[in-house]
Amino acid sequence: MRLRQLALQCSLIASSAFGVLSVAHADTVIDNARGYTLDAKGDVIEFASLAFDDQGRITAVGTAREVANKAPRAHHVDMQGRTVLPGLIDAHGHVFGLGQMLTELDLSGTTSLQQALQDVKGYARANAGRAWVRGRGWNQENWKLGRFPTAKELDAVVSDRPVWFERVDGHAGWANSRALALAGITDQTPDPAGGKIVRDLDGHATGVLVDAAKGLMEKVLPQPTEQEGRVMLDRALQRMASVGLTSAHDAGISAAQDKLYRDYADHGKLTARIYAMIGGTGADFDQLATNGPLDSYGHDMYALRAVKLYADGALGSRGAALLAPYSDDPHSHGLLFHSDEEVNFMIAKAMQKGYQVNIHAIGDASNRQILDAFARNIPVYHTENNRNRIEHAQIVTPEDIPRFKTIGIIPSMQPTHATSDKNMAEQRIGHQRMEGAYAWRTYLAQGSRIACGSDFPVESPNPFFGIHAAVTRQDAGGNPIAGWYPEQEMSLKEAFRCFTLDAAYAGHQEKTLGSLEVGKYADFIVIDRDLFKMSPYDIYKTAVLETWVAGHPVYKKK
Ligand SMILES: [Zn+2]
């Protein structure tokens, strides 16, 4: 659907039918709702009725009578007692990654290597015209393989074309021999700094490239054309609207993606607001940062005022940087991507230009490196109010957790990572280090605001999966029964807040988004059950019936 077209149609109807009185008639009232939102203090309040003007700004919220008094000649939409919530915000996702996953082969549902190989074979056959066979989502843990898969195994199903599949966490990739040859990777190729070419006991490269080693392959991968980028963005926006996301923070975009976002905003085609982070401080940053941060573009549909950096890899591929060795690999501490000097240089470069700095840090060593770097640079560049963030903050030494509060760093966390990682995480770091792992309650207790997200496409973009995981510490299968380290559970109110108001805060947007209050945007969703009166164990079953952005429906469930 096209927002601007819809807006245009509505105003045309209003002006032709009511002439000069059209301004008053442009108001819309959502009636007979079982509405929940947050007030400025973060308390959950109920409403039955909501009015907004033709700009999509809320003009009244409250009981039917209160709203009717303030918008007497409005067009009414009867919600028939259904539950209405503020639109949900994903504070960390990869929009084009989601779009790519929706257009390439997704292996995330496979439970064995055999099944994955069958899927690759079938997909390659059905897509004979594609020069590369690509996709993502594999996880050797789910295959109970006990090792990485190999190029030879891929060769057995596709050998005529290069094959490249990213691991579910995006921190490793699996190639066939054709792709390895195209990338020039031989047994003699050294591991690049911050990366690893997985090898067998004889030193032969076996086909999996971890972290920076993925760069060797990425250099030879064909870049998506603009048309392919549009298809990816369309698919991602459709999926986001269908799960109730009215806003997402895109964790690392290129100059080409920025161009597409602006184009979509110009043409009223963005059906979710995008708060984007520039990926890195390299050439794209130099190009995009010429005029400094873009606080708002296209009627507040797009913003580009943050930079995304990486401090380490992921836990699953043992790329996360730990202070002490991995519990299941005593020879490895994982990898810090950059020296302290390099980190300081990148932070300084972004802060000098006025950007919020959001840094991926998974392990306790990378979190410490980044906290140290923030503590050092924030006073120098006077960026105390920039709401700088650590993305994931997954494993943090308990003594470092209070520093998020004292330095003023927002932990940007993904509840479904905890419930997806739970078995693997404990193998990797052992019971002792779990105290500071996925420790939402500890952050909330010290007064930190957590920005919640999913890291889609690593996890599903469905925010109800995230709220469910945050509240129950269980996966959608109900495991473990008592919840995984249940002392770290959030309350429903807290989880709701982390996916709305606090996610908006993490993007400097809490004055316009995150709750349904007068003056804010009418970004809201209609769901099929009452979130605040149901069993928390069923939250993941919630279905979105309608999604509205700036007072316009962008999704209706068929
Ligand atoms: Zn991410």
Image (cartoon, rainbow, N blue to C red):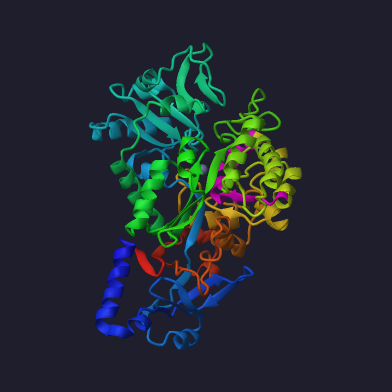
User: From the image, which quarter does the N terminus lie in?
Assistant: bottom left
How many numbered marks appear? 0
Q: Nearer the viewer, residue 447 or 355?
A: 355
Q: Main secondary structure of the magenta part?
A: helix
User: From the image, which quarter does the C terminus lie in?
Assistant: bottom left
Q: Residue furthest front?
A: 291
Note whether 429 is above or below 4 in the view shown.
above
Q: Residue furthest left?
A: 129
Magenta segment boundaries in residue numbering = 407-428
Q: Quadrant of residue 119?
A: top left
- The answer to whether residue 302 shows anywhere in this view is yes
Note whether 10 is above or below 369 in the view shown.
below
**Position of residue 530 measured from the top left corner of the image (x, y, whole percent):** 49, 70
Q: Residue furthest right?
A: 399
**Position of residue 486 measured from the top left corner of the image (x, y, whole percent):** 66, 53
Note whether 356 is above or below 159 in the view shown.
below
Q: For the point 54% across and 31% down, which residue is it?
A: 317
Report if residue 516 lies within the magenta region.
no
**Position of residue 548 measured from the top left corner of the image (x, y, whole percent):** 40, 66
**Position of residue 240 measured from the top left corner of the image (x, y, whole percent):** 41, 55
Report if residue 425 lies within the magenta region.
yes
Q: Quadrant of residue 165?
A: top left
Q: Nearer the viewer, residue 494 or 154?
A: 494
- The answer to whether residue 558 shows anywhere in this view is no
